[in-house]
Amino acid sequence: MPGYLTTHVLDTARGCPAQDMKIELFSIKGEVRTLLRTLTTNDDGRTDSQILPEGEFATGTYELVFHAGAYLDACGVTPENPRFLDVIPLRFGMSEQSHYHVPLLLSPFGYSTYRGS
């Protein structure tokens, strides 16, 4: 089975998908961090295409960067100064040719993630 990477962002405070959130994908090789792509979530909190599609998939270390502060600002969540959660980096490894799904459950003061299916 070919590997690929997807995500889904849910706003648990509002009980809805996180629409229009900027997400960046970086590959990590030693101390080198390389931007591979920038995407935005759709009205279902997902990206319109795979974050790392089958044809580009490689095992290794990656980082998803979720721009939560800008999303919360756009939703009208009153910002504290500075905002508690602004940019959320998630560094993870992909060790096999498989579907990796890395969702983010977000509220203004906390988040969680896991390897989904």
Image (tube, grey):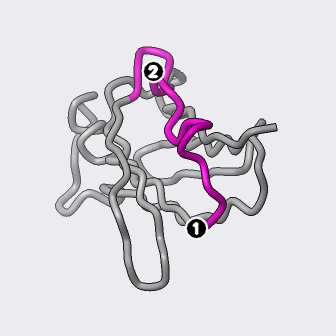
Q: Residue at x 57, y 38 (%)?
A: 55
Q: Is residue 111 above or below residue 49?
A: below
In the picture as drawn, the residue positioned furthest to the bottom comes out as 31
Q: Element at badge 2?
A: loop
Residue 89: quadrant of the picture: bottom left
Residue 41: quadrant of the picture: top left
Q: Is residue 113 above or below residue 40?
A: below
- What distance separates the C-alpha of mark 2 from that of mark 1? 23 Å
Residue at mark 1: 61
Q: Amino acid at mark 2?
A: Asp
- As drawn, the label of residue 40 is none
Q: Position of residue 54 (x, y in %)?
A: 62, 37
Mark nearer the N terminus (2 vs 1): 2
Numbered range of the magenta stretch: 41-60
Residue at mark 2: 48
Q: Position of residue 51 (x, y in %)?
A: 49, 38
